[in-house]
């Protein structure tokens, strides 16, 4: 008997029935929570001065890789609305699952950012207005002051590349059991390119969490710029699905 079977047996004995959809939603929520907590946490708690751009990039990449193996067997480990939408366009999941996944991912992203803030405020030197929560931005909110146009192009293209890797790594022709490695590594090298431009999103839920929390405490810039980190990644994800279908 597996651990999962044991859990289900205990749940049944207590009169609790967990549907497959609920399990997937919980997995997506937890996965997105971990991605935001670890990735943005490296930015906030270690900082670029300590972890460096490479360290931050690998924090996001390794967090995604770990979650692929932790929850991939439950939900597929999308932990990103752009990934779910791309899988929908490619015909790999249903509209219903896509909607449930996105809601779960958004809740997980906000919860991850809230948990990170709860940790960060324990440091007397932490100041939300100065350090932030690893939120994404452009123009004055860009790490290197890149424009809105540059940010839009970067987020669209980097998401396109990320989703091509995901579609390829999870295809039937790819070696089984290794998908997490190229996916995690691709997210790391994508961050190496995108961090100076926007802080790198390629994930609307990852952007939503920090933007909501800093917005609550008065940083409205993150919220007013949030649209770009939904629109550009979704366009990139849809294009990746279309191109992948042409390659098949």
Image (cartoon, grey):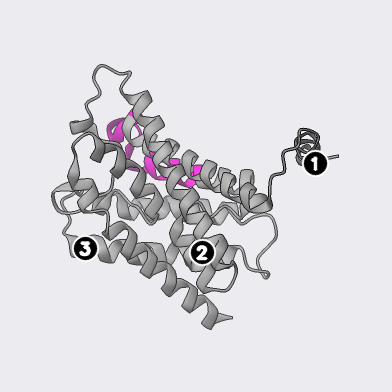
Q: Nearer the viewer, residue 33 or 21?
A: 21
Q: Which residue is mark 3?
A: 150
User: Regarding mark 3 in the picture, which secondary structure is present there?
Assistant: helix
Asked whether 188 falls inside the magenta stretch, the response is no
For residue 19, above or below residue 118: below
Q: Position of residue 53 (x, y in %)?
A: 33, 42
| The furthest residue to the front | 15
Q: Which mark is residue 165?
A: 2
Residue marked by disc 1? 5
| Earlier-in-chain disc, 2 versus 3 | 3
User: Between marks 1 and 2, how big is the CA–CA gap?
Assistant: 33 Å
Instruction: Identify which residue is drawn at 31% across, 57% down.
Output: 229
Q: Which secondary structure dominates the residues rendered in magenta?
A: helix
Q: Any magenta on residue 50?
A: yes
Label 2 sits on a secondary structure element that is helix
- 178 displayed left or right of 151: right
Q: Quadrant of residue 1?
A: top right
Q: State the extent of the magenta-drawn residues as a range.
A: 45-63
């Amino acid at each position: 008997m597996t651990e999962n079977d044991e859990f289900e047996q205990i749940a049944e004995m207590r009169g609790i029935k967990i549907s497959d959809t609920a399990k997937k939603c919980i997995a997506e929520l937890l996965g997105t929570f971990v991605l935001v907590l670890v990735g943005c946490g490296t930015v906030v708690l270690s900082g670029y001065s300590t972890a460096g751009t490479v360290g931050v990039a690998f924090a996001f990449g390794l967090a995604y890789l770990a979650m692929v193996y932790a929850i991939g067997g439950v939900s597929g480990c999308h932990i990103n609305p752009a990934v779910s939408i791309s899988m929908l366009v490619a015909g790999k999941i249903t509209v219903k699952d896509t909607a449930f996944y996105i809601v779960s991912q958004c809740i997980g992203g906000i919860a991850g950012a809230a948990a990170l803030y709860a940790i960060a405020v324990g440091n007397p030197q932490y100041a939300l207005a100065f350090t932030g929560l690893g939120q994404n931005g452009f123009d004055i909110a860009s790490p290197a002051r890149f424009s809105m146009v540059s940010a839009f192009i970067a987020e669209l293209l980097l998401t396109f590349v990320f989703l091509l890797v995901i579609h390829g790594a999870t295809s039937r022709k790819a070696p089984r059991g290794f998908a997490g490695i190229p996916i995690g590594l691709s997210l790391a090298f994508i961050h190496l390119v995108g961090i100076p431009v926007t802080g790198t999103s390629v994930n609307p839920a990852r952007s939503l969490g920090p933007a909501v929390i800093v917005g609550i405490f008065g940083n409205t810039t993150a919220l007013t710029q949030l649209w770009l980190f939904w629109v550009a990644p979704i366009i990139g994800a849809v294009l990746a699905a279309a191109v992948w279908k042409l390659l098949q």
